[in-house]
Image (tube, grey):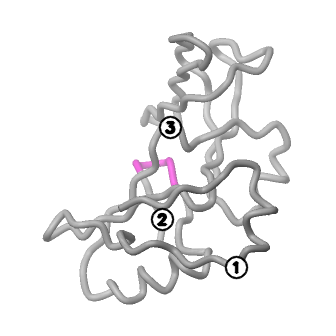
Amino acid sequence: MTASSREARFPVSRVGPYRRMLKESSETKVVADIRSEHLFPVTDGDTARDSAGGWVQGRIELVEPPGSLVMVQVMVGYSVIVAQFERPPGFDVGRAIILQHKIYAPHAFDVGTERSVLAAPLRVPCGVWQCMSERFEPYS
């Protein structure tokens, strides 16, 4: 399964708990969504492509500094993706960028009912938390 907006595709079913929940919902059409604050820039394209999370490459169209974070609009084909993160140096308009999503961040909704198919709290082995750069907070 992918979250997509024309050329912007993110794999979202590679992780065990999500795969199980999405498989249980396979009878219905599912739409996936990733929030702007759950996207982050990757400087090494090979790292992004080999990781369990999805990635997309585009060109920075707009940079807005709303405070301690920066909001970036990235053009991917004919689609615009918005990401929000701490501003590293060199993120200027026109520059190529690779965005990746946090591995446990995607949302998935049943198209017919608009209810989340990932609403149940995830049970993840403790060892996974040490591998993640940020603390995961399940969604309801």
Instruction: Calculate the distance from the C-alpha at mark 1 to the C-alpha at mark 2.
Output: 24 Å
Near mark 2 (Cα within 10 A), the count class, few <14, some 14-19 or many ≥20, is some
Residue at screen point 55% across, 44% down: 38
Rendered position, 126 above or below 66: below
Segment colored magenta: 5-9
Mark 3 or 2 closer to N-term?
A: 2
Disc 1 secondary structure class: loop
For the residues bearing labels 3 and 1, Cβ distance under 8 angstroms: no
From the viewer's perspective, is 68 left or right of 62? right
On the image, which quarter does residue 54 sit in?
Answer: bottom right
Label 3: which residue?
77
Q: Amino acid at mark 3?
A: Gly
Mark 1 or 2 closer to N-term?
A: 2
Residue at screen point 26% across, 75% down: 29
Q: Position of residue 48 (x, y in %)?
A: 76, 52
Disc 3 secondary structure class: loop
Query: Which label is found at residue 125?
Result: 1
From the viewer's perspective, is 76 left or right of 25? right
